[in-house]
Image (cartoon, rainbow, N blue to C red):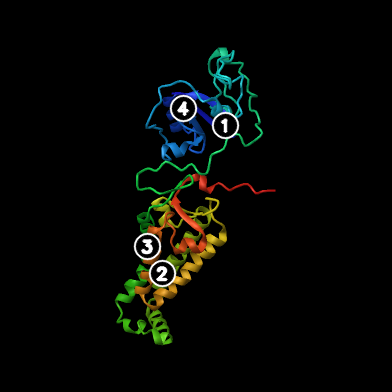
Amino acid sequence: MQIFLARNNVQAGPYDLDQLNIMLASGEVTLDDLVWHDGLDQWQRVGNLTGNQHTYRPTVVPNTSITNDSIVNNVTVFPEDSDTNPNGKSNQDGKKLSIDKLYGKPERPKPDAKNSKADMTSNRHQTPHNNVTLNKSSAAKPTSGKDKVVGNMILAPIMSRILATAINALMYLLAIFPLVMALTKMDVDYSKFQDIQNMDAAYQYSMTLMESVPSTTLMMSQVLVFGLFALQLIFITLRGQSLGKLITGIRVVDQTTHRLPSFIKLIGIRTLLLFVIYNLLFSFTSFLGFVVIGIHYYMASKSPENIGWHDKLAKTLVVKADSSQLVKQPKIK
């Protein structure tokens, strides 16, 4: 089984399956590189074939050694360095293109004395072109039959999203735990918070309770709450993940670019606006807030792309996290 690799429009190979897995394990080949072998109709992202794992186990290993020249030749190669040139003929030196050259690095000298005079200036610049492309319509290989796929991404399972929400709520409860413990020692009339028609009285009563709480306890709760909120904003801004999503391995991406959404979508809509909406809902009655959350996840479970009303509002998707989603797209000049 001959396997060809490509990166930055430069081809390397052929390699066998064991060599590929060794290079994947060592990090020489990344999940974002392209791969082709007999049985594939086009170049594929390595991670799509491996299920974003660092081991490739093809379901069917072709026995033929014939390569499809129309696909293999659709990249730039170093003919003098490749074991097999685009015409299928062996080069005089019989060397494969090294992974170092594939990655645009200077080739490292071998410790063998015969190679002591190895050329260290083989870092060649390749002009990018459109020969090697990863078709956006080629979906990532699902890790199970229940996975939903969009483009080259695996959508986050609904249960993972619910678990992330639960983790975020638990962190908030832990942050206000000192305040809750102080309130349990007081005689609180909870009926005053359920009178929707007299919100001013409920607010005044809550202020009276806060004045009765020890100042150190109140300050500790405020530090924990604001610290947690700041930490959440940092992770959401930089990674598209709340702490709950980070723990469950899922991320918010833009519906169009499949990359990290804009600051307005992440912070303005999906964070601050939703925070205000749910605070208003829970201030009226906790039941209403939980109903709206339930509607969101029900909509997501019935949608082909797991889109709930949060996602419709911000035009985002929630997917399994992958490092390629954090790569910024170059600006068009």
The answer to whether residue 189 is seen in the rendering is no
Q: Amino acid at mark 2?
A: Ser
In this rendering, which labeled residue sits more in front, label 2 or label 1? 1
Query: Which disc number belongs to residue 38?
Result: 4
User: How busy is the neighbourhood of tag 1: few (under 14 within 10 Å), some, or many (20 plus)?
Assistant: some
Q: Amino acid at mark 1?
A: Tyr
Q: Position of residue 246 (x, y in %)?
A: 43, 53
Quadrant in which the N terminus is drawn: top left
As measured in the structure, the alpha-carbon distance from the residue carrying label 4 to the one carrying label 2 is 61 Å
The residue pinned by badge 1 equals 103
- Mark 4: secondary structure: loop
Q: Amino acid at mark 4?
A: Asp
Sooner in the amino-acid sequence: mark 3 or mark 1: 1
Viewed as shown, does residue 24 lie left or right of 128?
left
User: How busy is the neighbourhood of tag 3: few (under 14 within 10 Å), some, or many (20 plus)?
Assistant: some
- Mark 3: secondary structure: helix
Which residue is painted at 57% across and 32% down in the image? 103
